[in-house]
Amino acid sequence: MASKSAKKANLLDHHSIKHILDESVSEIVTSRGYPEDVRLSNVRLLVGTIIIVIALFAQFYKKKFPENRDFLIACIGLYVVFNGLLQLIIYTKEKDAILFTYPPAGAFTSTGLLVSSKLPRFSDMYTLTIASADPKSVSAHEPVHLTKSVTQWFTKDGVLVEGLFWKDVEALIDQYTKEPKKSK
């Protein structure tokens, strides 16, 4: 459906399987009119660049070690702080997310999607979750989940049967968009 070449995974490597499925989910969601929101990725890249610049300043400072001791201590402190900030962003905001989106053009909703997935080690059960990118929004829906064995979507040779997978993911997107938010 989406691509002309077959997507093949090593069936003995769960990372390879999850990667192919996650890539396909991103294709499916964006093909349904949800533009990707890359703001969080850009923030992570900016913080990572700052970390690299701090490390480069520490490495190539003009003075040698005994003279630049205070400068090195400051650089090490900043390096630890910015790395902690980066880990905090990943832990609190990103979690298992594979895709953040904006709402589709012309939609009545004001929030995009947060698509996340899990494929535990030594398990064949792939869980795909679609939730609101802003769960506190008035237009947010309840999260929907799909848990299915990856053996349903791959041939014995490791080729993804895209038609079956697309059908399941599109049904999950439809389920999310149709389900009204329950009042608490």
Image (cartoon, rainbow, N blue to C red):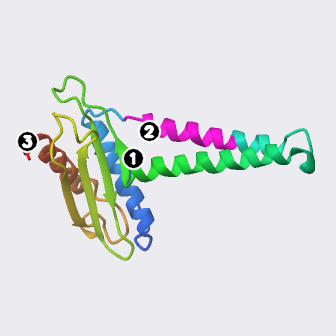
Camera-near label (1 vs 2) is: 1
Q: Residue at (37%, 69%) from the top-left corner?
A: 157
- Using residue 126 as the reference point, say whether residue 80 is left or right of it: right
The answer, for residue 100, to whether it is visible in the render is yes
The relative height of residue 116 versus residue 109 in the rendered view (above or below) is below
Going from N to C along the chain, the mark reached first, 1 or 2, is: 2
Does the stretch in magenta take in 65? Answer: no
Left or right position of 34 against 43: left
The answer to whether the residues at label 1 and label 2 have Cβ atoms under 8 Å apart is: yes
The percent coordinates of residue 4 (x first, y second) are 36, 46
- What residue appears at the point 27 percent right and 38 percent down from the top-left corner? 134
Vertical position of residue 129 compared to residue 54: above or below:
below
Instruction: Return the residue at label 1.
Output: 93
Image disc number at residue 146: none
Q: Amino acid at mark 2?
A: Leu
> In the picture, residue 159 is in which quadrant?
bottom left
Q: Residue 180 — which label?
A: 3
Precedes in sequence: disc 3 or disc 1:
1
Q: Which residues are magenta?
A: 37-52
Residue extending farthest to the top is 106
Q: Amino acid at mark 1?
A: Lys
For mark 2, give the secondary structure.
Answer: helix
Q: Is residue 88 left or right of residue 105?
A: right
Q: Main secondary structure of the magenta part?
A: helix
Q: State the mark number for residue 40.
A: 2
Occupied quadrant, residue 34? top left
